Image (tube, helix red, strand yellow):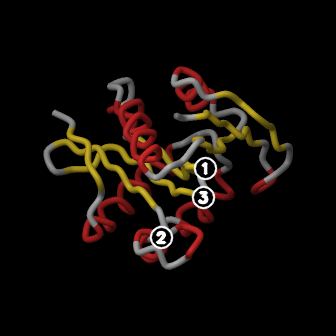
């Protein structure tokens, strides 16, 4: 049975391990930039984000999905002046289509409302159709497309007003 909860700081190494397992298997991001993603989400960088070292990220949220004490999915982001920014959402490939991502999104929206956020926002590769479809099912819309942007890829900026 999958359980959903907040991440504890001492579990950051488990989260980093899961991210290093999931991110390389996402075919929607260029292989040549894989090192950038993996370095960004090292144990050190995740710990700094979790501990709110940067004033911009003072209201961070780390959610995990676990099965038998093993993480199988995660979502994290932060309140950026009333807009909750979803930085990463990931689910192990063999656990996809079990509504784990949907549950994590719904939990994040609930927590964002408690943070007084009025909007959810994220970006994803313009060719990441499974992610775009998932967010659209939850009422998100593509608000902008950035051509040749981060890491020279096209990105969709996706948002949803929350009440």
Query: Residue 79 location in percent, x, y?
Result: 54, 56
Q: Vertical placement of 45 versus 28: above or below?
A: below
Q: Which residue is mark 2?
A: 49
| Measured Cα–Cα span from mark 1 to mark 2 | 17 Å
Query: Residue 59 location in percent, x, y?
Result: 47, 62
| Measured Cα–Cα span from mark 3 to mark 1 | 5 Å
Q: Vertical placement of 110 versus 46: above or below?
A: above
Circle 3/circle 1 CB separation < 8 Å: yes
Q: Quadrant of residue 8?
A: bottom left
Query: Residue 86 location in percent, x, y?
Result: 54, 48
Q: Earlier in the sequence, mark 1 or mark 2?
A: 2
Is residue 14 rendered to the left or right of residue 62?
Answer: left
Q: Which residue is mark 1?
A: 83
Looking at the image, is mark 3 or mark 2 nearer the viewer? Answer: 3
Q: Residue at x 59, y 64 (%)?
A: 35
Q: Earlier in the sequence, mark 3 or mark 2?
A: 2
What crowding class fits label 2: few (fewer than 14 Cα within 10 Å), some (14-19), or many (20 or more)? many
Q: Residue at x 54, y 47 (%)?
A: 117
Q: Assign a secondary structure to mark 3.
A: strand
Q: Nearer the viewer, residue 113 or 14?
A: 113
What crowding class fits label 1: few (fewer than 14 Cα within 10 Å), some (14-19), or many (20 or more)? many
What crowding class fits label 3: few (fewer than 14 Cα within 10 Å), some (14-19), or many (20 or more)? some
Is residue 128 rendered to the left or right of residue 79?
Answer: right
Q: Assign a secondary structure to mark 1.
A: strand
Q: Assign a secondary structure to mark 2.
A: helix
Q: Residue at x 72, y 31 (%)?
A: 142
Query: Residue 146 location in percent, x, y?
Result: 82, 44
Q: Nearer the viewer, residue 68 or 163?
A: 163
Looking at the image, is mark 1 or mark 2 nearer the viewer? Answer: 1
Q: Which residue is mark 3?
A: 80
Which quarter shows the N terminus? Answer: top left
Q: Residue at x 69, y 33 (%)?
A: 127
């Amino acid at each position: 049975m999958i359980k959903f909860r907040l991440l504890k700081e001492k579990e950051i190494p488990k989260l980093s391990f899961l991210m290093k397992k999931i991110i390389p298997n996402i075919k929607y991001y260029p292989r040549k930039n894989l090192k950038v993603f993996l370095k960004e989400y090292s144990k050190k960088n995740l710990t700094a984000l979790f501990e709110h070292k940067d004033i911009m990220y003072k209201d961070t949220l780390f959610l995990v999905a676990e099965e038998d004490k093993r993480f199988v999915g995660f979502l994290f982001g932060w309140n950026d002046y009333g807009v909750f920014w979803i930085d990463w959402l990931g689910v192990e490939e063999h656990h996809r289509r079990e509504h784990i991502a949907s549950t994590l999104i719904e939990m994040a929206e609930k927590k964002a409302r408690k943070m007084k956020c009025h909007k959810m926002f994220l970006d994803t590769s313009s060719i990441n159709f499974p992610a775009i479809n998932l967010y659209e099912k939850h009422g998100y819309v593509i608000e902008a497309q950035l051509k040749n942007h981060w890491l020279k890829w096209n990105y969709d900026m996706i948002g949803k007003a929350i009440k």
